[in-house]
Image: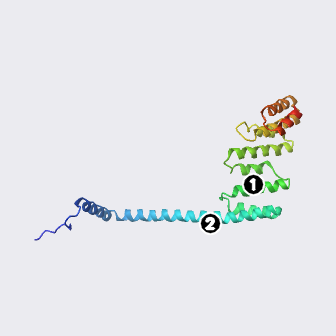
Amino acid sequence: MEKKKVPLEKDVDIEFEYKVYMFYDFLKKNIKLVITGIVILILIIATYFYYRHSQEQLLNNSSVALYRIQKAFSSKNFDDAEKLINQFKNKYPDSPFIKVALAYEILIKREKNSIKPEDLNRLQVRVNSKQLNAGLTEYRAYIYYKNKEYGKTLGIIRNIDQRYYNYISALTLKGFTLKHSGKEKESANTFNQVFQLSKYEYFKLLAKENM
């Protein structure tokens, strides 16, 4: 009986052919595993492209919604703007533009003189910049100051130190808060700090008048 010949041609790389046969043999033995792996890979690729598409849609749709808010705010149609903001918060809570929508909400409440410290909290938790957060912290303290809640003002304002751009204005607010709390000596010392540290004449004049 004639022996079967190995299907190799002349001048063929035997090592390469061996690897091909080994790979083919592996496929035959593990066909289910291979098919499962291919299906998983296809699903991962499909999920990735679906995610990208949905993110693009989210950005496009939410940017249009934000434009409507901006337009209503610019026209001073604050009631319409508030309705659009509420719709935005319900429909696009995961949009990166949510921070801007919340900022417009605060601006509208400021225009209506109805802003509350908790309104700023909602924006602060979404703001990653420490410097911007320092500005919002000072504004929150100022609202408490306006409401004559001086203990809360001082509790918040102490979080702003010389690392932040608004340290001098926060220190000035602290000086006025202490003054209205009846702590004249501490207030004078705080205004003296403002006078010594400030580069701006505005704050120096305020400090000099209240030392």
Residue at the left extreme of this rendering: 1
Query: In the displayed structure, would residue 124 be above or below residue 167?
Result: below
* Dot 1 alpha-carbon crowd within 10 angstroms: few under 14, some 14 to 19, many 20 or more: some
Q: Which mark is residue 57?
A: 2
SS under mark 2: helix
Q: Which residue is mark 1?
A: 103
Q: CA distance from mark 2 to mark 1?
A: 23 Å
The one nearer the camera, 167 or 106, is: 167
Amino acid under label 2?
Gln
Q: Can you say whether 18 is above or below 164 in the image?
A: below
Residue 49, compared with residue 181, is above or below; it is: below
Q: Quadrant of residue 184?
A: top right
Say few, some or many: other residues with alpha carbon within 10 Å of mark 2 (under 14 / 14 to 19 / 20 or more): few
Left or right for 106, reference 51: right
Image location of residue 126, percent across then percent down: 68, 51
Quarter of the image where the C terminus is located = top right
Residue at figure coordinates x 74%, y 56% from the top left: 102
Q: Amino acid at mark 1?
A: Ala
